[in-house]
Amino acid sequence: MSILRFLNRLSMSGKLALLVFLLYIFVAVFANLLSLHSTYEPSTKALQPPDRTHWLGSDDLGIDLWAQLVQGTRTSLLIGLGTACLAGIGGALLGMLSGYKGGWLDRLIMRLADAALALPSLPIMIVCGAFFGPSQFNILLILSLFTWMTPARLVRAKALALKEEPYVWLSRSYGASLWHIITHHFLPSLTPLMLVSCMRLVNHAVIAEASLSYLGLGDPLSRSWGLILHHAVQFKSIYYTPFWKWWVVSPLAALLLFVLSLALLTRELEKKSDFVRE
C-alpha cells in the first residue's frame, strides 16, 4: 500500500524514469533469453544493417549488436550495483562509525576520505586498470575504492546530529551496544540518505566503467556499452560510412537513457525523502 502511495506522489517524469529503470533491470536479468544470437560468434555477414533477424545490425565481425547491447546492460548494472553495495553501504557504515565514535577514529577516517577526494580519480583509475589488468572484479574494486568517500561524509554529518538526540542518549545510558544504536536509531533515519547516495554511485560507476572500457581497459571477455563503442571507433573511417548509425548510436543511446532515467529517479527520491523515511 505504501508503494502505491509513493508511486502516486511521483511526478510524470519520475514515473517514466522508474519505468525505464525497471526495464533496464528486466533486460539485465533476462539477458540470456533476450539475446537472439551469440555475443562471441558471428551470426551474419559483417556490418549487416538492421533487419528483422538482427534488430541493430552487426559489427565488423558479423556479431549481432542487439545481443552485445543486452549483455552490456547486464555488465553495466552488475558493476553499478556492485559498486553501490561496496562503496555506498561500506562508506555509509564508516560514516556512522566515524560520526558516532568521534575522536581519533573520526579523524583517521575523515583524513583518509579527504586524501582520496583530493586525488584525480579518473587518471588513477586508468593507471590502476592498466596495472592490475582488465577484469570486471578489478574495475569494481577500483571504482569502490574511489567512491566511498562521498556517502561516508554525508552519513557522518547526519550521524553527528543524531547522536545528540535524547533517545540516543537514553539508549546509551541504559547500556545499549553500538550495533543496537546503529540498527535501531541510525539506520531508520539514514536509509533515505543512503538510498539516494547509492543511486548516485550506480550512475557514477556505470559512466566510469563505460569510460574505462571505451579506453580499452575493460574486460575483453565481457560485453559492455563502453567496449562496443571502443570497437566501433577503432573501425577505420566509421563516421564516413553509414555503419555508425547502428554501431555507435545504439550503445551511446542506451548509456545516455540509463543515466538520464536514474538521475531523474534520484531527484524524485530526494524530493520524497520524507515519505521514504515513513
Image (spheres, grey):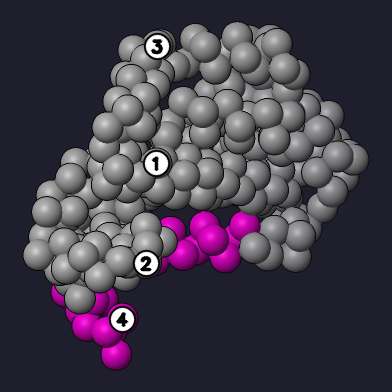
Q: Residue at x 47, y 16 (%)?
A: 122
Q: What residue would you read off at disc 2? A: 180
Are the residues at dot 4 and dot 3 in contact (C-beta closer than 8 Å)? no
Q: Amino acid at mark 4?
A: Ile
* C-alpha span from label 4 to label 2: 28 Å
* C-alpha span from label 3 to label 1: 20 Å
Residue range highlighted in magenta: 1-28
Are the residues at dot 3 and dot 1 in contact (C-beta closer than 8 Å)? no
Q: What residue would you read off at disc 3? A: 119
Q: Of helix, strand and loop, which one carries label 2?
A: helix
Q: Residue at x 75, y 37 (%)?
A: 222
Viewport quadrant of the C terminus: bottom left
Residue 113 image position (x, y, % from top left): 36, 24
Q: Is residue 239 visible from the viewing direction of this image?
A: no
Q: State which tag comes first along the sequence, 1 or 2.
A: 1
Residue 49 image position (x, y, % from top left): 69, 39
Q: Amino acid at mark 1?
A: Leu
- At label 2, counting other C-alpha atoms closer than 10 Å, the crowd grade (few under 14, some 14-19, many 20 or more) is few
Q: Is residue 163 above or below residue 180?
A: above
In this rendering, the label closer to the viewer, 3 or 1 = 1
Residue 123 versus residue 28: which sits nearer the camera? 123
In this rendering, the label closer to the viewer, 1 or 4 = 1
In this rendering, the label closer to the viewer, 1 or 2 = 2
Q: State which tag comes first along the sequence, 2 or 3.
A: 3
Q: State which tag comes first along the sequence, 4 or 2.
A: 4
Q: What residue would you read off at disc 4? A: 3
